[in-house]
Image (cartoon, rainbow, N blue to C red):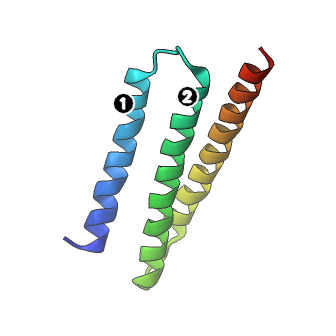
């Protein structure tokens, strides 16, 4: 299996995590849900980073991968802010 195939497979699995998170999120624990979502976004970010590095190492143009990486970086940040806010709200209750 090539490096590109492994990256593609991991990307598909990372996307599937979001479906599982949506299905399993009962809303019982907002902090837990926010942290799990942040970790899933971080996982996707890591995969996009490896994809961009792979494109660069192969001598290709990594512009599309870098654009995706930037979008996923924003998602990671947003998820972490949500998790920290939920944690803070829980602490003050």
| Residue pictured at 56% horizontal, 59% vertical | 69
Q: Which mark is residue 32?
A: 2
> Is residue 23 placed above or below 39 in the rendered structure?
above
Q: Nearer the viewer, residue 31 or 9?
A: 31
Is 58 left or right of 36, judged from the image as shown? left
Residue 3: horizontal and vertical position, in percent?
Answer: 30, 72
Pick the residue in front: 31 or 64: 31
Horizontal and vertical percent position of residue 84? 71, 35
Crowd around label 1: few <14 · some 14–19 · many ≥20 (10 Å): few
Q: Mark 1 or 2 closer to N-term?
A: 1
Q: Residues within 10 Å of mark 2 (few under 14, many from 20)?
A: some
Report helix, strand or loop for mark 1: helix
Q: Is residue 72 above or below residue 78?
A: below
Furthest residue toward right: 92
Tag 1 residue: 20
Q: Residue 51 is drawn in which quadrant?
A: bottom left
The residue most toward the left is 1
Helix, strand or loop under label 2: helix
Q: Residue at x 61, y 27 (%)?
A: 31
**Does residue 4 appear left or right of residue 89 in this picture?**
left
Q: Is residue 79 left or right of residue 63?
A: right
The quadrant holding residue 34 is top right
Residue at figure coordinates x 33%, y 55% from the top left: 10
Q: Is residue 11 left or right of residue 36?
A: left
């Amino acid at each position: 299996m090539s490096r590109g195939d492994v990256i593609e497979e991991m990307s598909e699995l990372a996307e599937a995590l979001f479906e599982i998170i949506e299905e399993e999120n009962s809303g019982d624990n907002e902090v837990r849900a926010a942290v799990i979502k942040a970790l899933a976004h971080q996982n996707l970010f890591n995969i996009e980073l490896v994809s961009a590095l792979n494109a660069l190492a192969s001598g290709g143009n990594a512009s599309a991968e870098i654009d995706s990486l930037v979008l996923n970086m924003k998602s990671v940040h947003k998820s972490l802010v949500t998790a920290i806010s939920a944690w803070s709200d829980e602490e003050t209750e």
